[in-house]
Image (cartoon, rainbow, N blue to C red):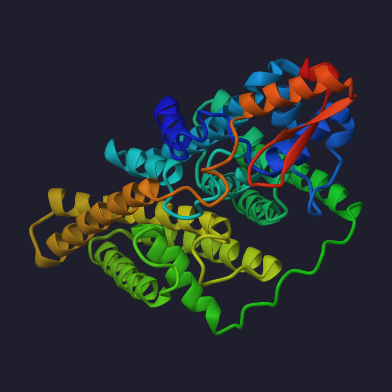
Amino acid sequence: MLCATSAVAFFRVAPESWRGVVWAEDGAIFLQQAYTTRLDQSLLEPYAGYSHLWCRLVAEAVASLVPVSWQGLALNIAAAVAIGWLATLSAQVVRAHTGSRWAPWAMAAAVAAVPVGPEVFDNIANTQWFLLPVAFIALFWTAPTGAWRVAVAATLFIATASSPFGMLVTLVACLSWLLLRDRARLLVAVSALAGTVLQTVVMLGAPARAEAGPPAPWQAVPAGALRRVLGDGVLGYARHDPSLPSFSLTAGLVVALVVAALLATAVATGGGSTVTLTVVVAGCALGVYLVPLTVSRADTVSSWVTGRYYVPAVLLMWFALVVLAHHALRAASSGPRSPVRWAGAAVAGALLVAAGYGMVDSALAPTPVGRVDGPSWEASVDDARSVCSASGRAQAEIAIAPPGWEVLVPCADVR
């Protein structure tokens, strides 16, 4: 599963990923600082006002271990493998709740091919938008072995130390331990808390961020959830003209009705635990929708520029939907025949088919402007090597995407 989902994530931005096209902060901020700053110093170095532990670790490993000509490809592979790991972890949680064969794969596909946020794939700077929801999902699982528990704890530490919104994960993790008081949850809570402490230290020492755009009016917040989370989260961002948001709003309303139907089916067929899990997950999804939206003042209409802000809520929604769909299909196949059970199964099947369409359609959509025509990293390194050889300069610029971004690398390393 790890290999399959990593490949899906990697080729989502093909052939740009294979050409080693480096995106913005991946090169100009994190890789460049890995060349100029020691790791112990860069871990406390803020960017955009907060800590990016994951990005710092990957950039340091790439700069230290990978030849310069291959570093663009290495960054893209690292981002894809991270998504593959998070898809695999979320699938394990779904398997524990359902015991199903297909449901874990459906959840993994939702992570690896999430049909929103076209700018989040194959770049380490935006991996935080996958770390955040899967960290929440991991809280709903007691890992069966020590190795899995360590892996979950490490994931939560990296998630909370890489995103300021990870504080929401820490809050839920600590509440979970206070309610259940078992060792596995204590390890998870401590790991999340440690990441939050590191994040807080960095944020307190960071310079003030520039003021974001105007806040969205409150009446736009529910409509934004219907458009971006429910509508795009199932049918994808590529199916409509972004300038015509009404279609997306209608799709969101339809998905909301589908969710209500699945919840009703679960209540009618004895799925009390499924309903409880869905309600709790929906609360987490609401938090990771409202808090980033409020802090970053993201546009609730456009599906291109601010799509990353909706990835966490979409993936949490999909965790709940996969569990609900599994219950509906199992109730129809194993319980007494009734119109309610068959209607629930039909709705669940239609939802899964629609989601498959949304994932494929969004994967086939054009890559966001600036990435598709970005320069090959290896070609840019060759140009920088020629500049260093001809001029005797101490450092050279390596062009990346989008236009105007570059990496300053010492000529000694370029050669």
316, above or below 89, in the image = below
Q: Left or right: where does residue 256 sit relative to residue 300?
A: left
In percent of width and height, residue 29 lies at 77, 41
- 223 on left or right of 259: right
* Horizontal and vertical percent position of residue 24: 68, 44
Q: Is 23 positioned to the left or the right of 94 in the image?
A: right
State the residue lying farthest toward the left: 337
Instruction: Give 110 or 16, whichever is nearer the viewer.
Output: 16
Task: Give the left or right position of residue 372, taking residue 31 as reference.
Answer: left
Q: Residue at x 50, y 51 (%)?
A: 118
Q: Residue at x 37, y 62 (%)?
A: 275
- Image height check: is 189 above or below 348? above
Quarter of the N terminus within the rendering? top left
Q: How many marks?
A: 0
Q: Position of residue 14 (x, y in %)?
A: 45, 35
Q: Which residue is more in the foreground, 397 or 47?
A: 397
Query: Visible in this render: residue 328?
Result: no
Single out the residue that lies furthest toward the front.
Answer: 390
Q: Quadrant of residue 388?
A: top right
The answer to whether residue 154 is above or below residue 226 is above
Identify the residue at image location x=63%, y=46%: 402
Q: Residue at 69% of width from left, 39% of height from top?
A: 26
Q: Quadrant of residue 213?
A: bottom right
Quadrant in the rendering for residue 204: bottom right
- Which quadrant of the rendered structure holds the C terminus? top right
| Residue 15 image point, x, y percent | 46, 33
Question: Is residue 207 shown to the viewer in this render?
Answer: yes
